[in-house]
Amino acid sequence: MTLRLSSAGESHGPALVAIVSGLPAGLTLDREAIDADLRRRQEGYGRSPRQQIETDRVEVLAGLRQGRTLGTPLALVVRNVDHKNWTWGMSPWPPEGEPSGKGTKPVTLPRPGHADLAGVLKYGHADVRDALERASARHTAVHVAAGAVAKALLTTIGITVTGSVVDEEGLRANVDAARVERDTVGGVVEVRARGVPPGLGSYATKED
């Protein structure tokens, strides 16, 4: 069965959610291993001040019993600690009372070079926040948790995946320069998979 990942949640909403389907029954998962990957995500050079607010830990709502998968969809949750400051602005229902906290005023200017403008045009949003909350680096937290689950599955068949920055010193310098200019910058990462058997998957489509 093909692994599938669906995710939901906003950057300043209550939580981020991922549903992983296609997992076999009986796969052992280690919460500490998943949380360790979540910590690694927060320790990257040049990360935003948001990382000092959040302390990410994975929660499981379905598909796991006593550390073993059930073969049913696995529901993962990563809470947003900062949501307490956005309860009025990010309320899923029309909020009661006077506006308070953050996010109470509409955002009218899309961030240059970001997905904001595309989201506003695609869905017809009047408030850019309705697009930027999903198009946020914060959203990758729950993807990391799901990736740690996939990594546990690969380990059972002897496959290991590692990644590293190709030019770490140069990347740090570029990040420092971009911070001064209030800009963003990319980098180059090398990913290696070891133990992958020949013929796994397809060279044409993922369904083959």
Image (cartoon, rainbow, N blue to C red):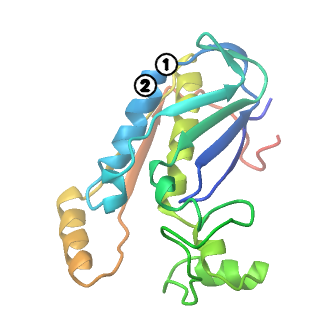
> Is any atom of residue 24 visible in this view?
yes
Compare residues 67 and 96 and report the one nearer the observer: 96
Residue type at mark 2? Ala
Q: Would you call the spot at circle 2 few (<14 residues within 10 Å), some (14-19), or many (20 or more)?
A: some
**Whole-number angstrom distance, CA of label 1 to CA of label 2:** 5 Å
Residue at screen point 50% across, 49% down: 80
Q: Is residue 143 above or below residue 173?
A: above
Residue at screen point 72% across, 23% down: 63
The residue that mark 2 highlights is 33
Per the rendering, the mark at residue 46 is none
Q: Would you call the spot at circle 1 few (<14 residues within 10 Å), some (14-19), or many (20 or more)?
A: few
Residue type at mark 1? Asp
Compare residues 4 and 121 and report the one nearer the observer: 121
Q: Are marks 1 and 2 in contact (CB under 8 Å)?
A: yes
The residue that mark 1 highlights is 30
Q: Secondary structure at mark 2?
A: helix
